[in-house]
Image (cartoon, helix red, strand yellow):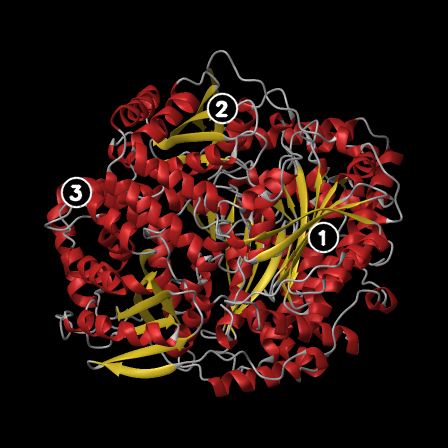
Amino acid sequence: MEGVALLRSLSTCSSVTCRRLLFQPKNRPRLFSSRIHRYKQQVQFLYGSSTRRWQPTTTSFKPLRLRRSLSFSPSAVSTSPHPAARDAGNDIAEKLGFDKISEQFISECKSTAIFYKHKKTGAEVISVSNDDENKVFGIVFRTPPKDSTGIPHILEHSVLCGSRKYPLKEPFVELLKGSLNTFLNAFTYPDRTCYPVASTNAKDFYNLVDVYLDAVFFPKCVEDFQTFQQEGWHYELNDPAEELSFKGVVFNEMKGVYSQPDNILGRASQQALFPENTYGVDSGGDPKVIPKLTFEEFKEFHQKYYHPSNARIWFYGDDDPAERLRILSAYLDQFEASPAPNESRVEAQKLFKEPVRIVEKYPAGEGGDLNKKHMVCVNWLLSDGPLDLETELTLGFLDHLLLGTPASPLRRILLESGLGDAIVGGGVEDELLQPQFSIGLKGVAQDDINKVEELIMNTLKSLANDGFTTEAVEASMNTIEFSLRENNTGSFPRGLSLMLRSIGKWIYDRDPFEPLTYEKSLQSLKERIAKEGSKAVFTPIIEKYILNNSHRVTVEMQPDPDKASRDEAEEKEILQKVKANMTQEDLAELARATQELRLKQETPDSPEALRSVPSLSLQDIPKKPTHVPTNIGEVNGVKVLHHDLFTNDVVYSEVVFDMSAVKKELLQLIPLFCQSLLEMGTKDMDFVQLNQLMGRKTGGISIYPLTSSVRGKVDPCTRIIVRGKAMSGKVEDLFNLMNCILQDVQFTDLQRFKQFVSQSKARMESRVRGSGHGIAAARMDAKLNVAGWISEQMSGISYLNFLEDLEKRLDQNWDEISSSLEEIRKSVFYREGCLVNMTAEEKNLNHSTKFVAKFIDLLPSSASTELHPLRNQLPPVNEAIVIPTQVNYVGKAGNIYEAGYQLSGSAYVISKYIGNTWLWDRVRVSGGAYGGFCDFDTHSGVFSYLSYRDPNLLKTLEVYDGTASFLRELDLDDDSLTKAIIGTIGDVDAYQLPDAKGYSSLLRHLLGITDEEREIRREEILSTRLKDFKEFADVIETVRDKGVVVVVASPEDVNAANEEKSGFFDVKKVL
């Protein structure tokens, strides 16, 4: 689940905000982030915080999909209007061993940036000073692999498993437990590895920096074969009589990646575009190749590339610049210069003289029409080297024009063609040495593959010949400039956004400041468009870099229902051969080594080792929760919430409508209803004109349903939220457009609606494969409470089934469906029960009141239908959702309120501790899953366990059931308890931008959570004691004894589980 996962806020509907380059880096959930964030978002919400070609692989609980995109990424600007910059001083830098190479005030981000070079090693450092309290550090190494054994990725995991100064199993996890970090992560790119951290607390920030520097330069893993086995791969044999298996965290992670068609397509495209350089292999690791990696190669890779001479180091924020250099010099001075920078340099791929075509297969289910499940993507390598800034800006602008909104012509024409269900390909990708462009469709019939390619080429030729409309160019320009002015990076630190943009040049030995100083080039581009016309600007770009570019690769993906089982059989055959070549002594030794590794994994660190990791004390923690200014008033009989916060002249608004009058039989149409409002036209404007008008006048409008249980109440909170933002001078336009969308859009375009259904079905199918933990969580919630049932009807397996049925009857039943959409509108959009939430500076809030009043006056006074309270839940049976996959997602949940539990803030501390210790150690570390975690929904009372990319099934359930015993036997010293409390407060007080503060306050208002309750919960968190853990053990036995199990898993593993436990699962096949 995306957005505010706690509230099951369904962001499946379109937004006219630029969804591609303009609001980078994208906070698209990846791996198990949506569910991992669910706990964090829940406490933030309560207290105050709230397919592309390749993906960086990540280690932490906050995985993100990242794009540098020089183009129009938001600049990382200061959080107040008056930045104050400092520098370390030349004398101090000189004494600490650094040469100052250059200094620049970057007006775009209101920061002073200084570029240093460490004299002894050549390590490069950028120190950015401003008044942003969310301080950021990052160290980046160029790490180009020569094969697909996944060395960079495995090393990224492993260096965080103990170091010289912090000799415990996983300092990284200790930081997760007891830090106030606002970001803690690591990513593996195709050619570099990044280790960033962030915190608003200076002491905590420097603790994080020190742990990370020691980890990358002096890790234990290069001397510890068992860490390599744990994080990379190893043979596992519990008994010589049993079958041999492969285990390893990265190994299982990548098996999950290679089970997803979009990922297979992306990797095939990248490797075909770059057959001669490092991008032609998989830095994340191919599961078929990972077991070829040796420990010696692993150690050599670290020695070669993890050296200061090969490092780019970044600091950002309001901390002391001299202290940054002092910390660095203590580490860097221990090294001599290395030839690593020459050895790590990435060579450019030479351009092809002829286009290339390749065909790959992906694992598909046996159901449905396989003929219509093909995928095709056309990819171009745009140049034989890096591009200049103005060309990159122009390409980014062009990318938005082509694909950035539902009205963009290339995207629109492809989807309207009926040749496929959804777009694939990432458009312009410029994070690597050479930029690329890719576009295609999935859900394509085999006979239509060539037609898709022809349509792409013909559309691009037509656009080159005819150009773009003035309205389209104006809408794109406004969207770009709005994003730059707004500078909204969501929960992603602004300083990290800035770092990733800079590193995209810096890593290739180019000017690191160039991507940050875009204003002059952007203004030049605007003037050129105004003077010469957009056709003169964009047509030569389309022709040179795409149409006349022979470095083109077309990738066709064919569905293969036997591929998953064939891959498993091949792996099993390899293991059988390995075992057959072992002697009895070998087998006995392997069984002993397996047991030894497991014992190490499950043995806690000593108190002395744990104390080596620096931490804060409770005295460093504020006693009161974050306060968001909220003034509750009324405009024309409608409640209005005002949040007076500095927003840089942007006005944020949410209009909330009650959807409890919607009939049960219409519930599943709501996501499509929301999309239709934004992507169908009115009587006077077609959807393209409406979309472009929104782009020209606002910063974006989105509409989505929101559902949550309400603690102490039977009926859930069910709302539809209309979110919008605009500059203060265009608030009238924003509310006029909202009114137009809600009341004037006509539900009459059958062909558009067919596209929505196809896109939604394709999105859901991808979600089942890639986010099985989210599917399992939604399904369990639907069995345990009404809000969960409503949400699952609109976002889970039930919704996928609905879409499959709806697709078949659209033509026959369109009049009825169109009438149903109109009925939903009449049941939802009315004045009674409406709520308006506004976040901006006070003067802009006051200025907006008259426009809010006019908007409210135009709403119907009351619903045309009566309320339809729902009481539905799915049957509470154990269920297996069977899909073609090589990994599993295992869930178990129960309602602890029904067992009599009364909410206490200690539950936040305990559930976080369970996830970071028991589940991390048993499900991830020794079990080999990529993730294991738990979640307590304090609104419904549902406590749930989930695993992500898990090689096990019943074994994982045994771990869940052992949680109560773990808590009863727990011996928690004061230091460990303090860390657990501080880590929880870190989640509670997570850094938020102003719009998120206003939105979180709105959600608390909707669910009746008062400031008094927040203070009580905070006091309970801070006063958590060991006895609370012991008492909680009795509570979660309810989950063990009465909980429901839902897994998303392979047919082989489900069959094996049902053989071992007869009839344990009801089996449901999807895909």
Residue at 37 percent of width and 24 percent of height: 540
Where residue 878 appears, as percent x and y from the top left, is 48, 58
Q: CA distance from mark 2 to mark 3?
A: 34 Å
Circle nearer the viewer, 2 or 3: 3
Residue 778, position as x, y percentages in the image:
44, 59
The residue tagged 2 is 360
Looking at the image, do the residues carrying marks 3 and 1 touch, with CB atoms under 8 Å apart? no
Instruction: List x then y, in percent, for residue 555.
Output: 45, 23
Location of the N terminus (image quadrant): bottom left
At x 19%, y 69%, the residue is: 855
Viewer-closest of 166 and 917:
166
**What distance separates the C-alpha of mark 3 from that of mark 1?**
51 Å
**Which residue type carries mark 2?**
Glu
Q: Please indicate whether residue 555 sits to the left or right of residue 244 in the image.
A: left
- Residue at 26% x, 75% y: name it: 849
Locate residue 869: give its quadrant: bottom left
Question: Which residue is disc 3 drawn over?
Answer: 750
* Marks 2 and 3, the one that precedes in the sequence: 2
Horizontal side of 770 relative to 199 (left or right) equals: left
Q: 84 or 550: which is nearer to us?
A: 84
Please name the residue that numbered disc 1 is placed on.
925
- Judged left or right of residue 860, residue 658 is right
Q: Amino acid at mark 1?
A: Val
Q: Is residue 341 above or below residue 1053?
A: above
